[in-house]
Amino acid sequence: MRLKRSNIIIIHPDLGIGGAERLIIDVALALQARGHRVTIYTSHRDPTHCFEEARDGTLDVRVRGNTVFPAHVGGRFHVLMAVLRQLHLAVSVLKELEQRGGNSDEKNKTTTEPEEMDDIFVIDQVPACVPFLKSLGPRFASSQRQRILFYCHFPDQLLAWRGESAPSALKLAKTLYRYPFDWFEGWAMSASDKVVANSRFTRGVVSRVFGSQKLGDVRVVYPCVDTTAGPKAEQESEGDAQAPLWGGKKILLSINRFERKKEIALAIRAYHGLDEEKRKGTRLVIAGGYDNRVQENVQYHRELDALATQLGLQTATSKTVVSALSIPDSIDVLFLLSVPTAFKETLLAQSTLLLYTPINEHFGIVPVEAMHAGLPVLASNTGGPLETIVEGETGWLRDAHAVPEWTAVMDQVLYQMDRADLARMAAAGKARAEKEFSLVAMGDRLEEEISEMLGADRRPFYGWYQLLFVLLLALGALTGFFLYLL
């Protein structure tokens, strides 16, 4: 049964360039294509550092809740600020819902829209606002029904740095600081009417961390790529088929944010493992999300550049497509910072092999993008790639700690496979992306989950008593601490 037209309200903290941002943009596109009214609320969007659909009018994006709390304080307290910023954002959303409800009679006189649509909140990354929307949302709107779907990419508490390499005192302080936020994450998420995950791998982790009873039956809704029109690079290359990148060098491509957890150094080490003679006529291109505001992006890029130089590889860094296309032929490793979507698709269309290095990646949309472009993928044999890549058919899965195995696959693709073998893998990858990870498939799954959510009663939420107990406990502990000092 087709889901009736609904008012989809998406709340996402920062619409930058990354996997989570690409996913939430695709969620919006998939639901908007089915006739739903979709609005994305975010605390931050830099028009020069976001996906095109978030700035060109394709989607209704509203920046709210960014005037009181900064993203961090002196490079610290990121999680606290993220919670406060999202709560501020939620207040802005509720105010606009109240205004919409108050003006509904006037609107109905001038528009043919249905008088009422169900309000569906779609939250991801930070669940802090979920309990408040659950409790206050119905008071601020005139919709028939409201439901909250939380899309879980991965538990934040497992992504946070715990001071593993820090002195004991700092490690203890970090643990004590994180504990209330870790508890709060599960508590807030449990207020959702439904929780979905981006892969079976993530679902297993979520159930283990938070408990299946607290979150209910967590389903999987895979991220997607838009397979309806074909890669833009293919369309653009039709009129310029004789314009291969860098004189037709064989490109080994890595696309990831410049973060240490992405293990990009593996690609450099494996590439260096090729004989110098075999590296001739090839280039390792490391492209991905890069934000000058993020200290780790800046530091990790420097570390990767230093590693490549130490191994005797010549490097260059480009921030624009024009400068990237004009680098000398002698460059072995090219770093592309925040590569535009159109040029990324050109890279995918003209590369020989994609290197996907993260370990235990929650899902990983880049391998799917590569398969859709007909590009074989070499990835870590952990996490999401186990669900997207078919060994020997669309790519290879190898131990990320076994660098020689990665080098061997590179050598195989560059010098041992003929055009027929590569064409076979390209066709298999495109077919798999179309069947399992298309925008249409994602939209179908989302509508199924929302329909089921609307067909059931709102999940009860009794967590306010738990929050009150924890606050009283914290107050008692703080009082006891001060009495002890006296």
Image: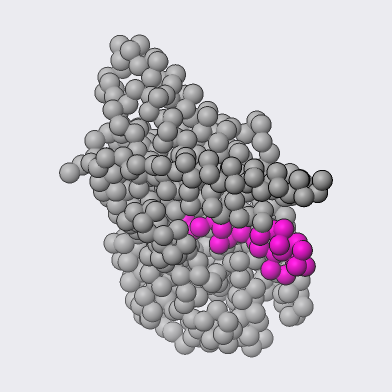
Q: Is residue 155 rendered magenta in the image? A: yes
> In the rendered image of this protein, does residue 151 appear above or below residue 303?
above
The quarter of the rendered structure image containing the N terminus is top left
Q: Quadrant of residue 256?
A: bottom right
Q: Quadrant of residue 388?
A: bottom left
Q: Is residue 373 visible?
A: no
> In the rendered image of this protein, does residue 183 appear above or below residue 366?
above
> In the rendered image of this protein, does residue 397 appear above or below residue 486?
below
Which colouring convention does the figure follow? Answer: one colour
Residue span colored magenta = 153-175
In the rendered view, does 68 fall on the left or right side of 38? Answer: right
Closer to the camera in the image, 59 or 83: 83
Q: Is residue 171 visible?
A: yes
Q: Is residue 62 rendered magenta in the image? A: no
The spot of residue 294 in percent (x, y) is 69, 52
- Residue plotted at (37% across, 59% down): 212
The spot of residue 190 in percent (x, y) is 42, 48
**Residue reaching furthest to the right:** 486
- Residue plotted at (66% across, 60% down): 175
- Residue plotted at (41% across, 60% down): 211
The spot of residue 442 in percent (x, y) is 33, 52
The spot of residue 465 in percent (x, y) is 47, 41
